[in-house]
């Protein structure tokens, strides 16, 4: 799970840097005006490819719930300890999330010491890769 989370952060950082470098190059060529650097905002304004708030939340130690408090019952479970009904609880939460919320949800579970069932890990990877 740690490797997946680290991979997500690396992918987000690469996407951010490539966008930022592309904007700087276009601004240098005079194709667009360079935007001033803004301070991170409380909520994402939607004007950026990657929201600064999302990146900060990934690094945060604050636990954010995604209407999934019932999953706290699975603290310290191993990925193969879940039965079908318990797996369906994770699946229900996962498929209620927006794509941009998945990484934050995974971080929340990690902070709460809740390991995803192995089948759900596969589904998360598939959702993020597509």
Image: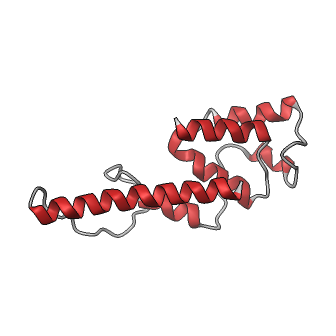
- Residue lying at 73% horizontally and 38% vertically, measured from the top left: 120
**x and y percentages locating residue 115 in the rendered image:** 79, 50
Left or right of residue 117: residue 21: left
Q: Which quarter of the figure has residue 60?
A: bottom right
- Residue lying at 88% horizontally and 50% vertically, measured from the top left: 77
Q: Is residue 90 above or below residue 4?
A: above
**x and y percentages locating residue 36 in the rendered image:** 22, 68
Left or right of residue 45: residue 115: right
- Residue lying at 67% horizontally and 43% vertically, measured from the top left: 67
Q: Which quarter of the figure has residue 28?
A: bottom left
**Which sits in the foreground, 45 or 10?**
10
**Which sits in the foreground, 42 or 35?**
35
* Colouring of the image: secondary structure
Q: Is residue 74 visible?
A: yes
- Residue lying at 87% horizontally and 42% vertically, measured from the top left: 80
Q: Is residue 1 above or below residue 37?
A: above
**Residue closest to the far left:** 30
Q: Which quarter of the figure has residue 14?
A: bottom left
Q: Is residue 43 visible?
A: no
């Amino acid at each position: 799970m740690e490797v997946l989370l680290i991979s997500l952060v690396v992918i987000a950082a690469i996407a951010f840097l490539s966008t930022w470098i592309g904007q700087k190059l276009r601004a240098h060529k005079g194709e667009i005006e360079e935007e001033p650097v803004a301070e991170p905002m409380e909520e994402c304004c939607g004007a950026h490819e990657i929201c600064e708030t999302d990146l900060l939340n990934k690094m945060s130690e604050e636990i954010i719930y995604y209407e999934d408090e019932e999953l706290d019952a699975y603290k310290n479970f191993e990925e193969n300890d879940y039965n079908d009904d318990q797996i369906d609880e994770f699946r229900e939460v996962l498929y209620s999330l927006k794509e941009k919320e998945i990484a934050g949800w995974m971080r929340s579970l990690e902070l709460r010491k809740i390991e995803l069932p192995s089948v759900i890990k596969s589904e998360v990877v598939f959702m993020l890769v597509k």
